[in-house]
Image (cartoon, grey):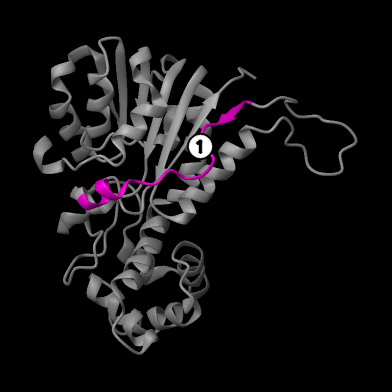
Amino acid sequence: MTAEAFQHEPAMPEEVLGYLRPERGGAFLDATVGGGGHAARLLEAGPAVRVIGIDQDPEAIEAARERLAPWGARVTLIRANFRDLDRLPGADDIRDLAGALMDLGVSSHQIDTTARGFSFRPGTSLRMRMGGTTGEGEPAADLLNTSSERELGRVFREYGEERRWRALAREVVRRRKTRPFQTSDDLVGALTAVLGRHASEREKAAVFQAVRIAVNDELAALGEGLEALRERLAVGGRLVAISYHSLEDRIVKRAFRDWSRACVCPPGLPECRCRGEPLGRVLTSGPVRPTEEEVARNPRARSARLRAWEKTSGA
């Protein structure tokens, strides 16, 4: 695996740099380092910048190590899921961060590598493990072949926002009785049978996204990761999150909003019993979207939504 093979153009790099302000120097944590695109831009901002890169994909870590080698000791790479930050060896040393970045979603390399099983191209194995072909986590085929109809319906409804979720779950269960789900064709076939026509690219993408999210427990991991990163920011440190679908963006938006409130006590309490002051402030009034020029140059950035938050209190 080379850096070139894994490399893809990072989404919204100028906006990321604008909010993180790496020219100040300090330690920056890239919680989804991928091929190192954003990390390289941070390191180029000045000699006082250090980057800690985290990724659960071993191929990403290998590619980032090659890409970021010119910066030597200013780079630390760790294979891990950002949700496990508090449990990493040496985690206590990752403190007082000047900034942190989460570029969520699936990389171009992961989508384009058939063995990873993320795409709905014909004949693709149903894997979808973010940790690699041998990573931890239940592969997509197992989820489709063993989950109850009720659980499958929940996945299609909540993670894929599929209107025909009941019928699709029922069809998956019916089909797996005679032939286990193994490839993308099996899932596309079930969706087409429910719709009564060929599924559109958008409909297939939504259903495959739902299964991927469930396999990797992505939404719960995002909530835990946001909390862990916030705790490790220095006062004045900034957190930037780039999401690619509404479910991720909603979690980021709510977290940033709640952290920026003085009181988060449940309604009805006679007096405030929580922290009593905001932890920080939201820097983006709404999601920042890529420019038309960037989308033309990098079509996979089309759905990107960037939000930024600054820590103002050590509470």
Decide if residue 134 is in sight here: no
The residue depicted at 36 percent of the width and 48 percent of the height is 304
Q: Is residue 293 magenta?
A: yes
The amino acid sitting under disc 1 is Thr
Q: Is residue 264 left or right of residue 256?
A: right
Q: Is residue 143 left or right of residue 38?
A: right
Q: Find the magenta span and give its range.
A: 279-296
The N terminus - image quarter: top left
Is residue 222 placed above or below 44 in the rendered structure?
below
Q: Is residue 151 magenta?
A: no
Q: Could you say where residue 271 lies in the image, as x and y percent from the top left?
A: 87, 31
Q: Could you say where residue 287 lies in the image, as x and y percent from the top left?
A: 47, 45
Instruction: Give the quarter of the image for residue 74.
Output: top left
Give the residue pinned by disc 1.
284
Is residue 63 placed above or below 178 in the rendered structure?
above
Q: Residue furthest right?
A: 270
Q: Residue furthest bottom?
A: 196
The residue depicted at 17 percent of the width and 55 percent of the height is 112
The residue depicted at 14 percent of the width and 21 percent of the height is 69
Q: Could you say where residue 126 lies in the image, as x and y percent from the top left?
A: 26, 64
The C terminus - image quarter: top right
Decide if residue 270 is in sight here: yes
Instruction: Give the quarter of the image for residue 183.
Output: bottom left
Is residue 149 placed above or below 37 in the rendered structure?
below
Is residue 154 placed above or below 31 in the rendered structure?
below
Q: Could you say where residue 248 lies in the image, as x and y percent from the top left?
A: 46, 50
Q: Residue furthest top?
A: 48
Count of numbered circles in the view: 1
Q: Is residue 14 left or right of residue 86?
A: left
The residue depicted at 13 percent of the width and 28 percent of the height is 66
